[in-house]
Image: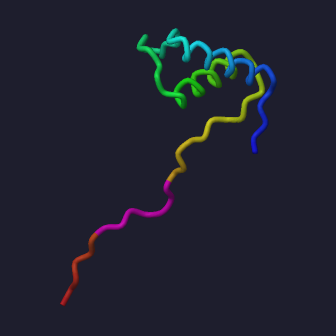
Amino acid sequence: MATYSKKASRKVETVMREKKRGKLKSGSGKKVTSRKQAIAIALSEARKSGAKVPKKKTASKKTGRKKTARKKSS
């Protein structure tokens, strides 16, 4: 499992408290209600402040050629 610094875990703690009290806002200014979104915000803020947080997972690129329909020659 990935390891997180104490600074990052403290940040998650404080952000979760904010969410519980209804004070946490997203980038657009709307109230955050999702637990997953709150954790994502906390880890993002921790990353910006220089805490040890594993890299974000990115979508894997599909490799290979495009499949195209071939006409049967008869």
On the image, which quarter does residue 39 sit in?
top right
Q: Residue furthest front?
A: 21
Q: Position of residue 20 (x, y in %)?
A: 55, 17
Q: Establish if 71 lies above or below 3.
A: below
- In percent of width and height, residue 11 lies at 70, 18
Taking the image as shown, residue 68 lies to the left or right of residue 28, namely left
Q: Is residue 66 magenta?
A: yes
Q: How many marks?
A: 0
User: Residue at image x 78%, y 19%?
Assistant: 7
Q: In this figure, which colouring scheme has been used for the structure?
A: rainbow
Give me the residue at 43% from left, 10% from top.
Answer: 29
69 or 23, which lies in front? 23
Front residue of 29 and 54? 29
Residue 67 lies within the magenta run: yes
In which quadrant of the rendered image does the C terminus lie? bottom left
- What secondary structure predominates along the stretch shown in magenta? loop
Q: Which residues are magenta?
A: 62-68
In the image, what residue occupies the spot 81% across and 23% down? 6
**Residue 20 placement, left or right of 32:** right
**Percent position (x, y) of residue 59?**
53, 45
Q: Is residue 70 above or below residue 12?
A: below
Residue farthest toward the left in the current orientation of the protein: 74
Farthest residue, direction right: 6
Q: Quadrant of residue 14?
A: top right
> From what the image shows, is residue 34 above or below residue 73?
above
The N terminus sits in image quarter: top right
Q: Quadrant of residue 46?
A: top right
Q: Is residue 35 left or right of residue 49?
A: left
User: Observer-nearest residue: 34 or 60?
Assistant: 34
Residue at 62% across / 35% down in the picture? 56
